[in-house]
Amino acid sequence: MDAPAIRTRRLSKRYGRTTALDALDLEVPAGEVFGFLGPNGAGKSTTIRLLLGLIRPSTGWASIFGHDASDVARAHRLLGHVPADVALWPRLTGAEILELLASTGPGTDRRYRDELVERFALDVSKPGRTYSTGNRQKVALVAAFATRAPLLILDEPTSGLDPLMEREFRRAVVEARGRGQAVFLSSHQLTEVEAVCDRVGILRGGRLVEVAAVARLRRLHRTEVEATFTGPAPDLSHLPGVQDLRRPDDGRLRFFLTGPPVEVLRALAAADVSGVRMRDPTLEEVFLDYYGDAGPPGPAR
Ligand SMILES: Nc1ncnc2c1ncn2[C@@H]1O[C@H](COP(=O)(O)OP(=O)(O)OP(=O)(O)O)[C@@H](O)[C@H]1O
C-alpha cells in the first residue's frame, strides 16, 4: 500500500464560533506509531471523529490509505478503532461482543484475540452492562488489536486502565508495529507516548504546533547540564545556547543548553572540569514548555 495510513489537508472543523480543529496538515505513513498529544479541548477527539467519518469537515479533507475518510465502507475495512467512551451492547457477554465485532470488522486473528483476553485479564463471560469503564476499554482494545487492519486509531485508550494493564497495552502496540500496523494514539499520558511512539504531534487550541520524532523533540528542547570543576568554574554565560546559568556556592555550574554543544564542550574541556552530567528533558517537560502550565523546567536541585 503506497498511500499513507492517514493524510489530512487543511482539515478543519468549526462548531458555531468554536474552531475545534484548524487547518490540520498531517501524514502518518503505514507502519508508524504516531502519538497525538494535547490538553483537554485541543481537538484530538474531533480529529479522530473526522478520521472515522463520524463528522464532516467544515473545510479540508482526510484520507485513510488514499480513501476519503467519509467513504466509511472502504475506510473502515482498513482500520480498527477504540473510541474515547466505549459503549457496549448491554445484554451481550464480552465473548459475544468480541465475536460480533470480529464478524463485522476488518478481519480478526481469533487466536491472538484469545491470547489478548488472557493478557488483559478480561472476564468475557459477563454481560456488557456489568463492565466497568476500564473493562469496556479492554473489550474495545482486544477487539481492535486483534484485527489485521493496517491502521488502528485509539482515542485515549488507557485512561481507565491500571498500570499492569497499561504495560500490556504498550506490549500490544509494539506487537502491532511488529506486524506492520500503523497506530494513531491520542493520549494525555506522556510516558506512554514516549514509550511507544515513533513520532508525536502536539495540538493546541485546534492547531498542530509541532510534529517530530520523540527523540528529536527532546533534543530540540533544552538539555540540562551540570558541571563540576577541580579549579574555578569558567564563565560560559557568553556562549551560544547557554541559558539560565547558575553558580551554586559549591563551585558547580548549572545551565540549560539548546543547539549544538560544541562550544560549551570545548570551554569545559579547557577548564579543570571534573564531571559533567547532561540530561535530556522528558517529554513531560517538553510538553510543559509548549503549554506553559508550569513554565519551563527548572535546573536540577
Ligand atoms: N459537538 C460539539 N459542539 C460544539 N463544540 C464542540 C463539539 N465537539 C467539540 N467541541 C469543542 O471543540 C473543541 C475541541 O474538542 P475535542 O473534544 O476535540 O478536544 P480533545 O482534545 O479531544 O479534548 P479531551 O482531551 O478533553 O477529550 C473544544 O473546545 C470543544 O468544546
Image: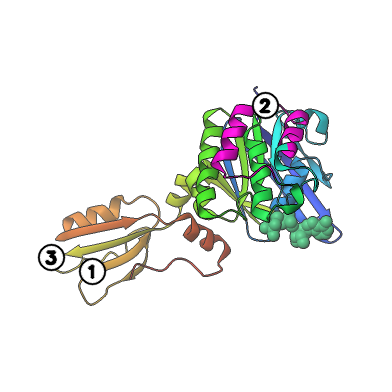
> From this viewpoint, is residue 20 visible?
yes
Residue 114 inside the magenta-drawn segment: yes
Q: Is residue 55 left or right of residue 182?
A: right
- Is 284 in the magenta? no
What is the number of the mark on residue 230? 3
Residue 23 vs residue 198, the one in the foreground: 198
Task: Please tell me whether the stretch drawn in magenta is mainly helix, strand or loop.
Answer: helix
Q: Amino acid at mark 3?
A: Thr
Residue type, label 1: Arg
Estimate the x, y position of residue 110 in percent, counting from the top left.
64, 28
Query: For residue 252, which numbered disc appears in the image?
Result: 1
Q: Residue at x 42, y 50 (%)?
A: 219
Near mark 3 (Cα within 10 A), the count class, few <14, some 14-19 or many ≥20, is few
Secondary structure category for the residue under label 1: loop
114 left or right of 54 in image: left
Q: Which residue is mark 2?
A: 3
In the image, residue 2 above or below residue 71: above
User: What residue is shown at x 45% (from left), y 51% (from top)?
Assistant: 218
